[in-house]
Structure formats: C-alpha cells, structure tokens
Image: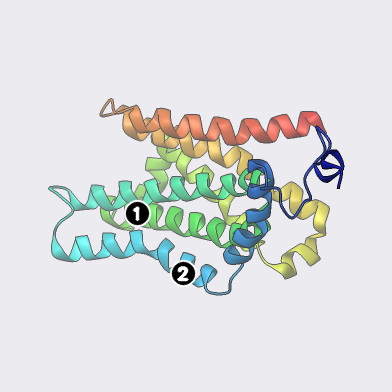
Amino acid sequence: MNRARALPAAGASEPAAQRPLPRRGAAAAAAPRLDAWLAHRAVKPALFALALVPLALLVIGAIAGTLGANPAEALIRRSGDWALRLLCLTLALTPLRRLTGWQALARWRRMLGLFTFFYAVCHFLAYAWLDKGLDAAAIARDIGKRPFILVGATALALLLPLAATSFGRAIKALGAARWRALHRAVYAIAPLALLHFYWMRAAKRDFDEVIAYAAVLALLLGWRAWRALER
C-alpha cells in the first residue's frame, strides 16, 4: 500500500467527529444546555424566594434589634438600596440575553421588574410610616420642600403604571406598540432613582456606591443607545 495515500494530505481537515471543538464552538454548544437549565420550572420560584430574602432579613433585623443605632433609617435606606439593585438587574437582563443567547432570561424580566416596584413601595412606606408617622400633609410638604424626596416620589409614580401594565391582558388592551412606548419610561426612572440615591448619600459624603451604580446604569443605558443608533 502506498504510504502517501494512507496519510492525509498536508492541510487536510480531520473528520468533524475527531476534531476537538474550538473554544467558541464549545461555548456555543454549552449555551443551549445552560439556557434549558435556566428555563427549568424550578428556577423561577427559586428566584422569587431569593428576591424576598432582603425583606425577610430587614424584618428579622427590626424584630431582633440588630439594625444598628437608627433602625428606622436602616429600614428606609436598605429597602431603597434593594429597589435600585433590582432595577439594575432588570435592565441587565436584555443585554445579557443578547450577548449569551440565554433566552430563558426573558422570563425573569417581569418578575424582577415587579420586585423593583415592590421594594420601591417598601422604601416609600418605611419613610412615610417611620419618618412621617403616615401624616399625608407632612409627607406632601416634605415632597415639595426637599428635592431628593420629590425625585424619589416621581420615580415611584413612573414605576406605578409600568407595574400595573406588566401583565398579558394589559399588553392586549394597550397594543404592543403603545405598551412598549409606555415601558420605555424605565429609561427615565433609572437616572431619577440614581439622582435620589446620590442626594441621600451626599449628606454623608459617601459617593463610592453612587459611582458604582452610575457606572452600571451608564453601561446598561449606553448599550441600549448604541443598539438604537445601530438600528
């Protein structure tokens, strides 16, 4: 047998079954498996329970008296912090889904958006109850007098119609185009929430977290602006 015929010619490719997947191909092959895992019916309830953990820790801390010297301030601030964190996480889902191909992430967007609203409401109620004693007139005066309260209240007011229309029936009633236009209000809510957070931290000259959130939101909103310009 001619040895030259037995050996593959120089530069000839090996059979596909014998070649190791390149790194990009291996990642592409793993993406559907991970996407299927993320779409498992147990993942969403687990995420729901996980989103309630911060509230549970705040309630336990209030009962046990472990929230520090000023528990009222701790409840107000930490509930607001979680509203901002969940807002960033909700905005991160679409870029992450586009970059990874994990389509199951789209199933989490509504729930995380509603949890953002939930923690924003908890933040406002903690302020209204613990700081103002649920006195509507005092709350109204405070909103008119202090800009950072006004900005926070505006962000919450803009979140309300988004939460109220985050269900399938609302999409049908409004129509897809109007529903999408309404939910673009989140791009105004994000900077308002960041401004509210900045003013809260400015009193103590604590800007490290403000810079971190500003960088995250700039990246997430900048990605959307780039996509819109590209289209």
Q: Which residue is drawn at 56% across and 56% down?
A: 113
In this view, 65 is above or below 11? below
Q: Return the x and y of residue 5 as percentages of the image width and height.
A: 87, 42
Residue under label 1, please give it. Answer: 128
Q: Which residue is drawn at 19% across and 52% down?
A: 71
Q: Return the x and y of residue 57 as percentages of the image width and height.
A: 27, 61
Is tag 2's residue or tag 1's residue first in the polypeptide sequence? Answer: 2
Q: Return the x and y of residue 137 as percentages of the image width and height.
A: 38, 51
Amino acid type shown at disc 2: Ala
In this view, 231 is above or below 33? above
In the rendered structure, the answer to whether residue 63 lies left or right of residue 15 reads left
Task: Classify residue 38 by image quadrant.
Answer: bottom right
Q: What element carries label 2?
A: helix
Q: How is the image coloured?
A: rainbow
Q: Is mark 1 on a helix, strand or loop?
A: helix
Q: Which of 1 and 12 is in front in this view?
A: 1
Q: Residue at x 40, y 50 (%)?
A: 82
In this view, 77 is above or below 174? above
Residue under label 2, please give it. Answer: 46
Q: What distance separates the C-alpha of mark 2 from that of mark 1?
A: 31 Å
Q: Which residue is drawn at 42% across and 41% down?
A: 143
Report the mark closest to the observer, 2 or 1: 2
The disc placed on residue 226 is none
